[in-house]
């Protein structure tokens, strides 16, 4: 009974996962009652017999676009209990069940037939609906190679109703596990069954599929990898290579390494796909009824086993921003009918974003097409006319246009010069507003654990708005356009906002690495970020950018087409008839075709110039070739569209006048050249030309190659056509994957003319080899495989529990910070309590950037200070007063640790009593002293040795300075730095690496350290004595604290810094504090705390154990919210000073209150100092001088036995001298007015508020 109850509970849990049809991509699976009957039947061996566990795998080579496969048993004609099969990018084309299925075996005890077979077949679903059963045509052509299965042509008598796979149950054994390998469309031959060892197989679900109860199977989270083990491809480690300095990991790599896993996608994964337009076609009847169907031409219309929700605007009238009078259909979907549209789109799992058409038009036509489109395509011009300008040159420029028409025809003029004011500011505001609308809709559709996949340059800042509200979501951004070089992208006034918006995603994808490389360079040059190879969740390495403690993965995967969909379109009668009509119209001619939008970026004039050059040099081909140029109207390009159309028409007229009929130009709307019409034209053409001067994703060459794949077969070679040749611009994205095409530079007219000639004179063998090479990518990388590969990378993004994420910044400057767990804002109240209870305190403070504004942040200021043309920043009177108050407390040991030279530090701070100073990162140290009138005494941590290395290092650095513009040498007393923060980032880094190697080789015999650091701030190479840093200084000071603090061990330490130079000091003190905590936990019998994060540099600090108190508490704090070795942060220098001032007031407040026993501890000379004409200081430590610790004949503690006020008055009266008088009682003492009567505070906790 207990087992049965447990089984029922498990089944209840599974019921919550099973309703698969809610995603709109599959049938309803078995419900709770069905599973209950199945479990009860399977649990009764007298009824069900023995049970074997089977995992089904099927190879689906020809599964089409948006199609899925399901397993159906023979006795389930109504398809009520279908079993879904899944695949991944690594396992494709193999589909498998998510977990083993239980099959009931015949029982000899019940007299059942041992020859019984298990019959089943596979159902194909498309867009969530039943499409067809598997057919013989689904069999792969190379099935004999893929698997040892003899495939024979089925007999004519076998129909689809009798098309079943069969497994003889006598081949199975009770309690064993098996894997059945099938080929879709192949049912003949013996079954391919692999036996799995039950000891190694991990079965999560044993629900019966073919049990006598007739119930189906259920889904579970298991995978095939758990049964057969991981493939070598998923476990092999790739070689680590770097393109720039690998970003330091701020998180514990041991934790990441222990969590390595094989990433796969299953039906429980949710995905929110966001694009500017939904991949559907909307239709409205005359009666007001709305209908929709998939736009199979759209890249995002694919169907998958994931739970997908699509978000975007509907592409109907008014989508491009035009609007008419009130009630006009050009205003988009009427508000009153939006509910109908939403209901129409619900079966497609599409959620529309409703945006006012004028606002969307400003975003799409104004900012996206007018500003971003030319910039992203590496085009910018300051010579173009401004739209809406008040002046315009009216001179006739016909002669100039004719002169340069053969070169570029002003292809670089791409709209107005953009800036951050006027019309451009309004367009930018519209762009951000539309992105906010999208963010609101995405958040409403988001479920915990979902991935968000954003597409297109229309939504580049959308991740910034998403991470504010769903920071733990895995957000991916994929751009289908090129990405420009940094020199072009930096011309955009909103460049930082766009880059930060993209970097707020967890993954940024491009079709080519070339585009990704440009993005990396922009982040490096404009934001100062680093990138490199980092380990991923599966044990490999990914290219990533380090941004605020987070790693943003860069993915470069080119999309493909769906061969199944295109092949099906090619079989349509309308497609064949249209292609045949075109061939008959140009019978006997070699047909060149091109399909381009009418804009200058597509390079149509250059294509026509190439044709003109070819016919001029090869006039014998006149009348034998024809170019069908289809121009798609690009109204959103405004003047560029009008100008390009005019120029193309003039050139076409000119060519046809010289060689009649050589060019056939036709302009059409985008809706008139959809996939079916395009495939008919590509099928009729012999050669396709795609010659843009800059282009993103263009699938026309892939579609053309697929349309002529039959030319590789003997039956396709008999038509006598020289077809299948593709002329492709090297500036198009697909040129990297279409290796069989003729690659040309469209700017070189002679090269275009040569490509025309090469296409018409190419031999049969070369043409077929090129077509076969191009077909390799087209058939291998489909749209679905592209999407799965990107999704696997996105799911593999690690948002570990050991990392906490928080936001910082305002507006579009908002960014997500990834920091180690426990890193939080400084808790001033907790620190106040620790500070107050401590008897011996150490305070280590950085100088610039912590208690004083950092001169290093401004490059010009830094250079001027180094060259001594500008005075450095000096501490204010408030800072000096705070340091004096802290040093006045004898429980405090205060040090200011700086990288400045000792004379500079002594000039500003040496007059403060009891303040310790450390210069040049701890090379020189001056111990605290109350004698400030004389000269400071300095010591060195390491012995000063031979310093002849300085001249050698400076000589070498001068050579690199002369050949690296923007670099300079900075000299101090004990170190030499080569700064390249003002140089080109990449060239400066390369030079720094070479300089580092050069110095290491030349100075290997000297006791020096050569450091290459500060890359985030620009970078430098430093040479300094070995073993000097702020961490070593901190340990040195701690070991001397008992001598400075009157013999007491240190029980409190506060360390504050702001940059990478302070990290060693923060790491050392934090480790010492952790050792003290673990020691206390060990004494209490508790387990030690978890390891410190990887941001803490581990060193041996055991030498400090004898100098710290068992109750030692350490507070480490960095200035600025950023990844650090510290465990807390304050936001800026002002907040740090405010905190230190509070500690100073707290120190004074602690000494302000004394009991009568404390008064008795002072001798007569001290008591006599309280004269009426000499006010008492508010700081008792200052008033009593050094007599606080004197015993005066009392016990060693300095306190006498308790006595009454009368006794104390008598003693005081005896010690009076002259006219000096001390109050005889406490009331008289308080009435003298020597101490201000301040209101008493209720609690120390309120001190910091």
Image (spheres, rainbow, N blue to C red):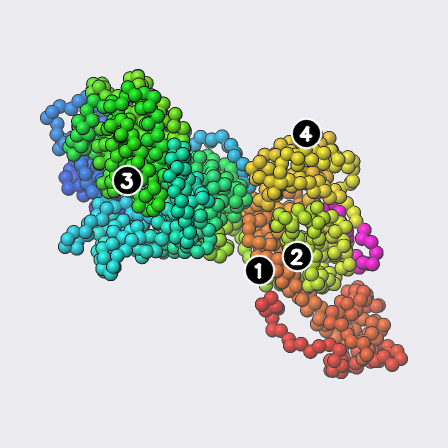
Q: Quick check: can you spot residue 948? A: yes
**Marks 2 and 1, the one that precedes in the sequence:** 1
The range drawn in magenta is: 920-937
Q: Position of residue 1173 (x, y in %)?
A: 81, 79
Which of 696/30 is in front? 696
| Magenta span main SS | loop
Residue at 82% over, 54% down? 935
Query: Crowdedness of circle 4 by 10 Å Cα count: few (<14), some, many (20+)?
Result: few
Query: Crowdedness of circle 3 by 10 Å Cα count: few (<14), some, many (20+)?
Result: some
Pick out the residue farthest to the right: 1218
Vertical relation: 415 (above or below) 695: below
Which residue matches tag 3? 632
Name the front one of labels 3 and 4.
Answer: 3
**Marks 3 and 4, the one that precedes in the sequence:** 3
The CA span between labels 3 and 1 is 63 Å
Which residue matches tag 4? 1001
Residue at 30% over, 47% down? 277
Residue at 11% over, 25% down? 156
Mark 4: secondary structure: helix
Which residue matches tag 1? 827
Is residue 388 magenta-colored? no
């Amino acid at each position: 009974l207990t087992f049965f109850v447990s089984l029922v509970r498990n089944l209840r849990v599974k019921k919550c996962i099973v309703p698969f049809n809610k995603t709109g991509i599959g049938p309803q699976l078995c419900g709770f009652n069905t599973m209950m009957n199945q479990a009860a039947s399977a649990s009764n061996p007298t009824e069900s017999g023995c049970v074997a566990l089977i995992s089904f795998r099927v190879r689906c080579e020809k599964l089409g676009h948006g199609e899925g496969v399901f397993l159906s048993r023979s006795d389930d004609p109504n398809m009520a209990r279908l079993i879904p099969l899944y695949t991944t990018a690594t396992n494709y084309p193999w589909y498998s069940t998510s977990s083993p299925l239980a099959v009931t075996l015949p029982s000899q005890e019940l007299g059942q037939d041992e020859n019984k077979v298990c019959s089943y077949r596979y159902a194909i679903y498309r867009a969530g609906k039943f499409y067809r059963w598997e057919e013989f045509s689904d069999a792969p052509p190379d099935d004999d190679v893929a698997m040892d299965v003899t495939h024979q042509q089925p007999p004519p008598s076998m129909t689809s109703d009798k098309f079943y796979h069969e497994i003889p149950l006598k081949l199975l054994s009770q309690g064993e596990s098996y894997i059945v390998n099938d080929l879709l469309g192949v049912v003949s031959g013996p079954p391919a069954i692999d036996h799995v060892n039950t000891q190694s197989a991990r079965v999560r679900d044993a629900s019966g599929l073919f049990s006598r109860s007739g119930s189906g199977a259920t889904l579970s989270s298991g995978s095939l990898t758990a049964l057969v083990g991981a493939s070598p491809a998923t476990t092999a480690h790739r070689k680590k290579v770097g393109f720039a300095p690998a970003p330091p990991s701020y998180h514990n790599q041991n934790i990441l390494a222990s969590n390595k896993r094989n990433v796969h996608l299953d039906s429980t994964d949710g995905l929110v796909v966001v694009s500017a337009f939904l991949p559907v076609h909307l239709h409205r009847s005359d009666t007001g009824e709305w209908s929709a169907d998939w736009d199979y031409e759209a890249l995002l219309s694919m169907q998958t086993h994931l739970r997908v929700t699509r978000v975007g605007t509907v592409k109907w009238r008014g989508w491009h921003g035009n609007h008419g009078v009130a009630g006009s259909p050009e205003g988009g979907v009427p508000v009153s009918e939006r509910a109908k549209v939403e209901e129409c789109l619900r079966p497609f799992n599409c959620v529309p974003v409703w945006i006012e058409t004028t606002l969307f038009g400003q975003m799409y036509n104004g900012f996206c097409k007018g500003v971003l489109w030319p910039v992203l395509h590496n085009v910018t011009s300051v010579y173009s006319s401004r739209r809406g300008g008040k002046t315009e040159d009216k001179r006739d420029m016909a002669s100039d246009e004719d002169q340069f028409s053969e070169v570029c025809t002003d292809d670089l003029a791409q709209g107005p010069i953009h800036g951050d004011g006027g019309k451009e500011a309004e367009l930018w505001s519209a762009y951000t507003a539309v992105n906010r609308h999208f963010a609101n809709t995405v958040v409403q559709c988001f479920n915990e654990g979902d991935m968000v996949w954003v597409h297109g340059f229309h939504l580049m800042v959308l991740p910034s708005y998403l991470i504010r509200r769903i920071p733990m979501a895995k957000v991916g951004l994929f751009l289908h356009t090129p990405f420009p070089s940094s020199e072009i992208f930096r011309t955009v006034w909103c460049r930082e906002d766009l880059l930060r918006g993209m970097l707020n995603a967890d993954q940024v994808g491009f079709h080519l690495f070339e585009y990704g490389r440009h993005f990396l360079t922009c982040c490096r040059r404009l934001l100062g970020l680093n990138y490199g190879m980092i380990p991923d969740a599966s044990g490999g390495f990914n290219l990533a950018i380090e941004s605020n403690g987070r790693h943003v993965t860069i993915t470069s995967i080119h999309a493909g087409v769906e061969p199944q969909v295109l092949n099906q379109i090619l079989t349509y009668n309308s497609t064949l008839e249209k292609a045949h009509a075109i061939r008959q119209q140009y019978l006997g001619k070699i047909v060149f075709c091109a399909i381009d939008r009418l804009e200058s970026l597509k390079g149509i004039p250059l294509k026509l110039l190439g044709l003109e050059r070819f016919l001029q040099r090869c006039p014998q081909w006149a009348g034998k070739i024809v170019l069908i140029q289809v121009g798609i109207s690009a109204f959103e390009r405004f003047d560029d569209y009008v100008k390009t159309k005019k120029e193309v028409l003039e050139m076409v007229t000119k060519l046809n006048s010289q060689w009649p009929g050589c060019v056939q130009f036709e302009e059409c709307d985008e809706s008139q050249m959809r996939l079916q019409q395009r495939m008919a034209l590509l099928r009729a053409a012999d050669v396709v030309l795609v010659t843009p001067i800059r282009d993103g994703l263009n699938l026309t060459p892939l579609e053309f190659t697929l349309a002529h794949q039959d030319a590789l077969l003997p039956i396709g070679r008999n038509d006598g056509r020289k077809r299948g040749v593709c002329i492709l611009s090297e500036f198009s994205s697909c040129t990297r994957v279409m290796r069989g095409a003729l690659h040309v530079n469209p700017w070189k007219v002679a090269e275009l003319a040569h490509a025309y000639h090469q296409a018409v004179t190419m031999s049969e063998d070369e043409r077929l080899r090129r077509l076969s090479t191009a077909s390799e990518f087209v058939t291998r990388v489909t749209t679905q495989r592209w999407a799965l590969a990107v999704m696997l990378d996105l799911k593999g993004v690690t948002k570990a529990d050991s990392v906490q994420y928080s936001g910082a910044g305002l507006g579009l400057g908002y960014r997500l910070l990834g920091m180690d767990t426990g890193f939080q804002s400084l808790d001033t109240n907790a620190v106040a309590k620790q500070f107050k209870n401590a008897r011996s305190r150490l305070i280590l403070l950085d100088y610039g950037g912590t208690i004083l504004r950092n001169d290093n942040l401004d490059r010009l200021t830094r250079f001027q200070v180094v060259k001594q043309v500008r005075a450095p920043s000096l501490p204010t009177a408030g800072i000096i007063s705070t340091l004096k108050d802290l040093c006045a407390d004898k429980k405090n040991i205060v040090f200011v640790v700086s990288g400045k030279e000792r004379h500079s530090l002594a000039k500003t701070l040496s007059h403060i009593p009891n303040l310790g100073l450390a210069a040049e990162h701890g090379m020189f140290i001056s111990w605290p002293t109350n004698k400030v009138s004389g000269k400071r005494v300095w010591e060195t941590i390491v012995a000063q040795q031979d310093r002849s290395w300085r001249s050698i290092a400076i000589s070498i650095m001068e050579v690199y300075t002369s050949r690296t513009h923007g670099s300079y040498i900075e000299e101090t007393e004990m170190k030499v730095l080569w700064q390249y923060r003002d140089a080109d980032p990449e060239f400066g880094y390369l030079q720094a690496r070479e300089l580092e190697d050069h110095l290491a080789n030349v100075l290997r015999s000297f006791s020096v350290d050569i450091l290459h650091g500060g890359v985030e701030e620009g970078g430098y190479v430093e040479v300094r004595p070995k073993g000097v840093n702020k961490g070593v200084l901190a340990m040195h000071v701690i070991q001397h604290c008992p001598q400075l603090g009157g013999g007491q061990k240190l029980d409190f330490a506060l360390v504050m810094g702001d940059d990478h130079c302070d990290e060693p000091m923060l790491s050392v003190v934090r480790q010492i504090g952790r050792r003290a905590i673990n020691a206390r936990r060990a004494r209490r019998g508790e387990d030690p705390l978890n390891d410190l994060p990887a941001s803490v540099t581990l060193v041996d600090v055991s030498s400090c154990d004898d100098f710290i108190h068992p109750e030692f508490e350490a507070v480490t704090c960095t200035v600025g919210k950023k990844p650090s070795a510290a465990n807390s942060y304050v936001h800026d220098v002002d907040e740090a000073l405010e905190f230190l001032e509070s500690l100073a007031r707290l120190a004074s407040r602690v000494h302000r209150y004394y009991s009568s026993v404390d008064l008795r501890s002072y001798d007569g000379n001290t008591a006599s100092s309280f004269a009426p004409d000499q006010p008492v200081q508010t700081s008792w430590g200052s008033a009593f001088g050094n007599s606080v610790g004197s015993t005066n004949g009392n016990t060693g503690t300095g306190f006498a036995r308790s006595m009454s006020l009368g006794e104390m008055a008598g003693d005081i009266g005896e010690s009076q001298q002259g006219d000096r008088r001390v109050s005889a009682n406490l009331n008289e003492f308080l009435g003298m007015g020597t101490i201000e009567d301040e209101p008493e505070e209720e609690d120390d906790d309120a001190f910091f508020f």
